Image: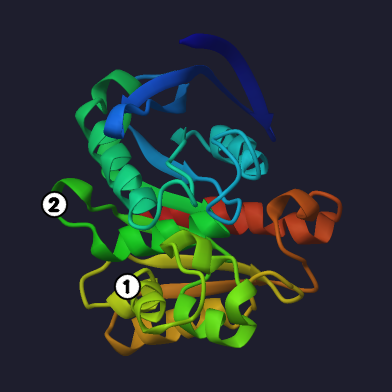
């Protein structure tokens, strides 16, 4: 495990903390899964975020795609974790969700060690990670429940998306499908977060760019509308003209306003 002490400044405030890297939290089928943890200085416990990376379910790790999210969370004084999970096509759905459920349980079990507040845990994911956190957020119960979800441009209706794009749609790799036959469609429906919306699920913040060519913008308001229909709080924060990925958003200051919204919403929701 590697430790790195650092500090960040935000206005007149300074937030110091420690990064703990490559901590094993699970070993499904003998495969080690690791996470990194940022622990702020101070007594705690602090509101906590578990970050889930994207990469089309087949690429990426805890230090890819989601790295622009780390500094805003550190500066805001959150404890945060970024996790690895099993990737497709070697591991089909629901392996990715199962690993995220396990991470939630691990964080709650080790909350005191990392100054995390087990009652104030939010999930945050982007792209494929958005699908994962939306699914886990909707289905979590008891030891796997969370207080909030921040979902960056996640696909929520996987079956509808696959029907639009055909057999080349990457979601087929997630469920092990080759063609859109009846069995593959059943698996895609089972992996679609929109099919698990129910009263009592945690509040969601959706963040999505209007020029996203990978995951259509309408996936976020569609999910939010269904949540509102059953009385669940949600909000869609629109990033005008932004493409897919918080990495590309770093190139345009106008697209980075989401960081302020993300932190403000988390503070309000996890207060």
Q: Residue at x 42, y 64 (%)?
A: 175
The residue carrying pointer 2 sits among few (fewer than 14), some (14 to 19) or many (20 or more) residues within 10 Å by Cα, namely few
- Which sits earlier in the primary sequence, circle 1 or circle 2? 2
Residue furthest left in the image: 142
Above or below: residue 234 compared with residue 89: below
Residue located 38% across and 25% down the image: 32
Q: Quadrant of residue 231?
A: bottom left
Frontmost residue, 212 versus 85: 85
Decide if residue 264 is in sight here: no
Residue 235: image tag: none
Structural distance between the alpha carbons of marks 1 and 2: 21 Å
Q: Across the whole image, how many numbered discs are drawn on residues? A: 2
Q: Residue at x 36, y 29 (%)?
A: 31
Residue 190: mark: 1
Left or right, residue 142 beside residue 243: left
Q: Nearer the viewer, residue 46 or 248?
A: 248
Instruction: From the top left corner, tell me how far across and down residue 98 is, in percent.
Output: 29, 48
Q: Image check: 50 left or right of 7?
A: left
- Image coordinates for residue 15, horizontal then vertical, percent: 57, 25
What residue is at 13 percent from the left and 52 percent from the top?
Answer: 142
- In this rendering, the answer to whether 97 lies above or below 47 is below
Disc 2 secondary structure class: helix
Question: Disc 1 vs disc 2: Cβ atoms closer than 8 Å?
Answer: no
Front position among marks 1 and 2: 1
Q: Could you say which is closer to the camera, residue 262 or residue 22?
A: 22
Residue identifier under label 2: 142
Residue 112's place in the image compared with 83, above or below, is above
User: Which colour scheme appears in the figure?
Assistant: rainbow
């Amino acid at each position: 495990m590697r430790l790195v002490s650092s500090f960040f400044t935000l206005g007149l405030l300074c937030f110091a903390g420690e990064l703990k890297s490559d901590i094993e939290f699970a070993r499904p089928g003998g495969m080690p899964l690791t996470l990194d943890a940022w622990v702020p200085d101070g007594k705690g416990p602090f509101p906590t975020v578990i970050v889930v990376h994207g990469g089309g379910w087949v690429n990426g790790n805890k230090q890819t795609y989601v790295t622009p999210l780390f500094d805003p969370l550190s500066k805001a004084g959150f404890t945060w974790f970024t996790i690895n999970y099993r990737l497709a096509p070697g591991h089909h759905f629901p392996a990715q969700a199962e690993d995220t459920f396990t991470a939630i349980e691990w964080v709650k079990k080790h909350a005191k060690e990392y100054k995390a507040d087990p009652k104030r845990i939010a999930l945050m994911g982007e792209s494929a990670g958005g699908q994962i956190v939306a699914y886990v957020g909707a289905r979590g119960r008891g030891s796997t429940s969370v207080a909030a979800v921040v979902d960056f441009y996640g696909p929520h209706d996987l079956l509808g998306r696959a029907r639009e794009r055909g057999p080349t749609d990457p979601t087929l790799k997630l469920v092990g499908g080759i063609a859109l036959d009846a069995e593959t469609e059943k698996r895609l429906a089972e992996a679609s977060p929109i099919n698990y919306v129910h009263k009592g699920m945690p509040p969601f913040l959706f963040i999505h760019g209007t020029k996203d060519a990978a995951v259509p913008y309408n996936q976020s308001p569609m999910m939010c509308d269904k949540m509102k229909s059953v009385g669940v709080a949600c909000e869609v924060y629109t990033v005008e003209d932004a493409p897919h990925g918080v990495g590309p958003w770093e190139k345009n200051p106008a697209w980075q306003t989401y960081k302020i919204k993300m932190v403000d919403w988390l503070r309000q929701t996890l207060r």
